Amino acid sequence: MRPAPIYLDHAATTPVREEVLAAMTPYFSVRFGNPSSSHRVGREARAAFDEARERIAACLGAHADEIVFTSGGTESDNLAILGTWRVLRTRGRDVVVTAPTEHKAVLEVAHHVADEGGTERLLDVDDEGRVRPEALDAALDARVAVCAVMWINNETGVVQDVPAITERVKAAGALMHTDAVQAFGKLPIDLRTLPVDLLAMSGHKLGGPKGIGALFVRRGTPLAPLLHGGAQDRGRRPGTENVAAAIGLAVAAERALAERAHEWARLEALRDALQRTVLARVPDAVVHSAGAPRAPHILNLSVPGTDSESLLMALDLAGICASGGSACQSGSVGTSHVLAAMGVSRELAAGAVRLSLGALTTDDDVTRVGEVFPALVEKARRLAGAVSA
Amino acid sequence: MSRGRVLVAMSGGVDSSVAAALLHADGYEVIGATMKLTCHGDELPDRPCCSLDSVNDARRVCERLGAPHYVLNLESAFSRDVVRDFAEEYARGRTPIPCVRCNTFTKFRDLARKAAALDCDFVATGHYAQLHDGALHRGLDPAKDQSYFLWGLERAILSRLLLPVGGRTKAETRATARALDLVVVADKPESQDICFVPDGDHVAVVRRELGADAPALQRGPFVDRDGRVLGEHDGFARFTIGQRRGVPGGFPEPMFVIAIHPDTRAVVLGPRDALLGRGIVALGMNWLLEVALEQPLPAIAPGQSLVCYDGTRVLGGGVIEAGLAAA
């Protein structure tokens, strides 16, 4: 039998933590109620659901009524941008500002705004993938409805200066949204001191279940719902509440925050060790966003003369799960729009591999990958050389 | 002990799925690969192959076998080597067979290269063709034989090639799929025409690749063998040697396309006997040969393939350059 794979794709998804699963389980069976029901079974579910909302709010320094549960990060980003833009466009603010390095859940929504008659403005980023402050200043004016900049980039791990960006956006009278799907549970977030208006989270990136996410919506923020058909969550997000998953998200967030500082240091040490080992054996490998503050769990690198597709297959056959730039619907590997926006050459971007560490990652994993990865690279290059010769 | 590692090209159809399952049952270590040749964002509707559903079907079959499955993005190479060439051949007044080029370049060069990088000992497909002692032969099922499309393979690959369904009939393949419980693929409809040509409309591909103002799509004359103008057509890319459809009527005998001259955009018409050729000149990467025909053959279209057999054995082939007029 093949040994268990080494999982280095935590930025894609993470396993549900045992305590999360245990907390959710009763709400699939004995406490199965619909929170909208007025009877005892329903009340029980309502109480648990409201408590989950309060616990997530507490993790962020927010009020409970500022948390809207969604199906995940994508829905949260859609609701944040479209929900606010559709109100503000009627008030003369029809522009959405964002960066070309955003997740597609933001970027495609900005394109959609343009299709619906609004305007999208994409901010120039530097070689590390950070928004250029002068580009932001140039883009902000009295027509801007909302500016969306992700806190930690899911491909490179680069950390945007969200507090500084927020300050500029607020000064221009626009709303600030941040996709914190990778940042929630990793960075300290206190919404009492950080004046973002909207913040997107997802459950399955931090040990919670798939199919649940949340959007922080600061009190007083105008928001039109995307879905219609029920009064749940003040009409902001109709549909029967996903009680068990909401509880799962709350527990996962609390556990991640409790371990945050320790886990950050642990992953950073592992990631740095992995980076050092790989660079020692593949000195011309290029680590993306290495010159900027980076989240500790993401190592995105390109090896000149290799292609991600072949490297990822070879890694998989060697029992190592990693991913490339952006997965296409078919599962084939495309070239990363993030690296392209950072000015990485097409050839180099075509060889990008993202290794993302997390709860499952051990010292042994990193040691093994540090041996296998360079060996596979050397082989891939020998073959590429043989072909071009 | 494994009999070796094999990369199986899987379209998501019944033939390649059964090929993978048979190799797995025979003790090979199977790796499934589906080639992504066209953009799924711009999906051709109701295609039995090359579609996103087909990728998913191939993946499910592999999951059943416990085999890894990958999607290989060969879009740009396929677009260059096969689709572009297809359009350019029509622009030269010829009649291409893209499946030959797809096998020669995309499957057995690009895919085989991926296989080598993954330490695969073999490459396998679901083609109805057979290998005996390192020689390529027709498939057992005469109605399904696909050896014709494989003449362009490099000889070196034959020793690494496995064709598990070539010795079966299509009915047997379907029965095997049902017996192995590969229900997702067992009763799939046959893929018929060219995977990237929607509704058999090859002119649409020419237009997309070369632009609506390409000379091959502009009006030109129908002429007879003596150069007399007989009428007007709206683009010689719409015609192939031997074609009757779209040819004007009102002649004493039925007229066929007997030649296409891209330089003057002329489509030459002639009676049925003008289609006959007494010989064939073929060019190609493996062959440069002139084949004398015992009986004259009709409609020898440049761009089509000349494939030579000794009994069932495929000796090789080439791309037809010209027919030699019957004496």
Image (cartoon, rainbow, N blue to C red):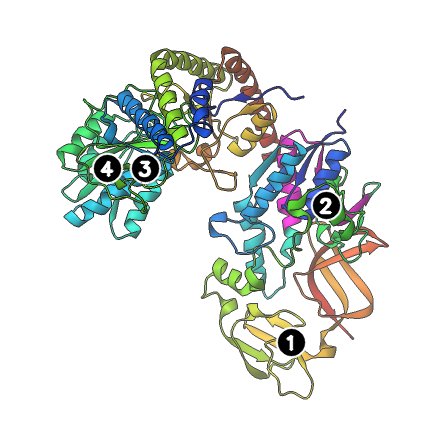
Q: From the viewer's perspective, is A5 left or right of A80?
A: right
Q: Nearer the viewer, mark 1 or mark 2?
A: 2
Q: Earlier in the sequence, mark 1 or mark 2?
A: 2
Q: Give the distance between the C-alpha atoms of the residues marked 1 and 2, in whole angstroms.
A: 43 Å
Mark 2 is on which residue type? Arg
For label 4, the SS is: strand
Q: What residue is pinned by disc 1? A: B244
Give, as a single range, the part of the protein colored magenta.
B102-131
Q: Around disc 2, counting alpha carbons within 10 Å, would you say few (fewer than 14), some (14 to 19), or many (20 or more)?
A: some
Q: How many marks?
A: 4
The residue depicted at 44 percent of the width and 18 percent of the height is A19
Residues at marks 4 and 2, common chain?
A: no
For label 2, the SS is: helix
Q: Position of residue B264 (x, y in %)?
A: 54, 73
Q: Position of residue A89 (x, y in %)?
A: 19, 48
Q: Give the distance between the C-alpha atoms of the residues marked 4 and 2, in whole angstroms.
A: 55 Å
* Residue at far right of view: B311
Q: What residue is pinned by disc 3? A: A77
> Are the residues at dot 4 and dot 2 in contact (C-beta closer than 8 Å)?
no
Q: Earlier in the sequence, mark 3 or mark 4?
A: 3
- The image quadrant of residue B304 is bottom right
Q: What residue is pinned by disc 4? A: A147
Mark 4 is on which residue type? Cys
For label 1, the SS is: loop
Q: Give the distance between the C-alpha atoms of the residues marked 2 and 3, in whole angstroms.
A: 45 Å
Q: Nearer the viewer, mark 4 or mark 1?
A: 4
Q: Quadrant of the C terminus of chain A?
A: top right
The residue marked by circle 1 belongs to what chain? B
